[in-house]
Image (cartoon, helix red, strand yellow):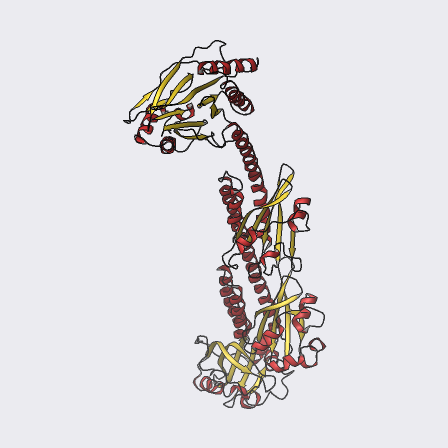
Amino acid sequence: MAGRSRVAPPLGAPSGPQVPVDTGGGHRRAALAGMFGSAPAIFAVLDGPDHVLAQANRALFRTLGVASGRGLLGRPLRETMPELVHQGMPALLDQVYRTGSPFVARGAHVLLGRAGTAHDGYFDFTLEPHRNRLGEITGVVCTAVDVTRERRARKLAAEQHALLEQIARNVPLGEVLEGMCRAIEKLSPKVLVSVLLLDETGRVLRHGAGPSLPDFYNQAIDGSEIGPRVGSCGTAAYRRESVIVTDIAHDDLWADFRDLAREAGLGSCWSNPIMSSTGELLGTFAFYHRTPRTPREEDLDLCAVFARTAALAIERDRAEAARRAAHSREQAAAADLAFVLETSTAVSREPRYPENLQRLARLAVPALAPVCVIDVLADGHISRVAVAVSGDLPEGSEGLLAGCTPDLRADSPVSRVLTGGTREIAHGSRLSPLPELGIAVPSYVCLPLTARGRTFGTLTLVATTDKPLDSRAVDLAEELARTAAAGADITRQYAHRAQLARDLQSGLLLSALPDVPGAHLSACYRPAGEGLDIGGDFYDVFPLPAQRWGLVIGDVCGRGARAATTTALVRHTARAVAPLLSDPVAVVRAINTALLTQSDSEEERFVTLVYATLRPAPCGLTVCLVRAGHPTPLLRHGDGTITASLVPGQLLGVSPDPFHSPETVDLHSGEALVLVTDGILEARDRGGDFFGEDRLTEAVRSSGAGALAQPTLDAITDAVDAFSHGVTDDDQAAVVLTVR
């Protein structure tokens, strides 16, 4: 700092208020000298109009940077302190000497010292006239107090207060640190401030702030590793203590950065580690100067104070970041849970297999991965039951994957997971689990679908280059695989059971209705609910001697295997005895005898049925009916009227001698015979009402006079479905015969 090159404000216009003082008379020099000799306040007596330095205490000499007053005492102010001349001090002294009025200044900015040792400061000072015994003014007494530290402390407190307000408002850390650097540079105008932050590894310092340092310098030191000889900051972080380098050009700590510092025009660097309240290293705080320089006490104090403030800002930022991260994790966990619940619910709402797994695959794409494939093991072979791909994959990818089925004997992720029952996840160089896809696969995961301790399938997620597979997707997929596997296994069992029931039921029903001369026949069978059990409703049509045909429709008590055996018994008995017995009542009684013979003490077997024989006649067909406890047959006549066959008859399998009576009717062309089981009549609406005979009659009438068998049957089933909203609580069977 050059002493004469810096111009301070005129002392006649101090930064603080000026206070007039009534001296009430002069004081003795001896008394003043004794009072201020060892005091920290500055004291000086200037004699005569030339303001010759007559007396001064040690505080003045310390302020001027000299050891003693030799060479100064007895010389005028213009020679002893020439730097005060340009600051207006002689004019103030002349005014006091001439008028006898004292002058007081508060917080005056004063430059003191010669070139090379000059420094500035702020002073409260008083100029008073010095009088002799006669009251004549002989000089000026000057007293001054250095208030530089107090003033700086007030400014420092104000800057810290502003920074603390920013920290409290959660202003971004970068803004706080940059504001801190600028505040220090304002307090110490020749200082360049830098803040480096320790990264999460604890080994590297990253750029935090350095607004006055060159950009290339900040970029060069960003990412420096800490160590025992890594400049001032890297070494301070390594040692966890202050490192003061007064001359960068000649200090070994800067050996690897000396050229960089020279290019940036830096001569010295003092660095403090920034430590948390728990003793954890957070970063470094550095003061740079353009020239080699030794820090003053106030410089070190300033560095320490702002290092603590920086620590507070960094800790607050980390705490806020941790809070945000925790909140984000909570939100992510909640979103993941919602996704799992929504997906699991959506899958569980699909009661059919494998449609529920197909829904799972569609929901997994693209939420978890761009490709999802589900394979299951059935009858010793792998079957691909579900494929879903994102829309940005090549056209035809889904069809290509759906058409390829893994070989259980081949070494593939699917076969390995099916065999081992544990997940397989791979990144990078592993072969693609879906080579037929024909694209780069950076990662995949193949998860087992396991239920009741048995792995029955796999769920495979495949990533693409632009949509990588992360740990979150894998975790969610595992959870979905666990929950979906249980539901899929249940629906799979139901599907197998329903298929078994259908297969067994089909063995109890006609695979196709025969072509009866002179007649049109249509029939339907609809199992109750999901069709998981074998029903008791049945129908049969078979040829008899003499161009006759037998027709039977019935309902066996119960469901399942017992109902199946009873149905088989009735059908086979009817087919066996009908060709031998021309009387329909005799055929029905033979069936009753067979039921009674096969029944046991645990459970009775009883059946309701209608047995009819069909014989060609000049009018069309002659039908002989026997009703055994079964719903009444309906007859639709040529004019569209509907009548019911009211011939009585008891159900079978209860009594050894039931009463039955035959009824013979002639059916003409266009007329119809309608036979149904009680599952149709007892279909319920949502209010619990039965479909009943009246609605059945109306449904038959609605098909129109002369309608063929199939339209008439469709009218019946449509009416039942509309009434019951498609719910089948009991098996339903119907046979419609119309005359050609």
With respect to residue 371, does 489 lie above or below? above
Residue 335 visible, this orientation: no
Residue 474, percent from left and from top: 59, 51
Where, by quadrant of the figure, is residue 222 drawn?
A: bottom right
In-front residue for pair 141/277:
277
Residue 406, percent from left and from top: 63, 49
In-front residue for pair 536/163:
536
Residue 530, percent from left and from top: 49, 32
Image quadrant in which the C terminus is located: top left
Where, by quadrant of the figure, is residue 681 drawn?
A: top left
With respect to residue 391, does 657 lie above or below? above
Instruction: Please identify the residue farthest to the top as the structure is shown.
Output: 657
Image quadrant in which the N terminus is located: bottom right
In-front residue for pair 712/422:
712
With respect to residue 648, does 229 lie above or below? below
Residue 590 visible, this orientation: yes
With respect to residue 691, does 153 lie above or below? below
Numbered marks: total: 0
In-front residue for pair 237/569:
569
Where, by quadrant of the figure, is residue 224 drawn?
A: bottom right
Q: Residue visible at 56% across and 90% down?
A: 79
Residue 228, percent from left and from top: 72, 70
Residue 659 horizontal side relative to residue 403, left or right: left
Residue 672 horizontal side relative to residue 94, left or right: left
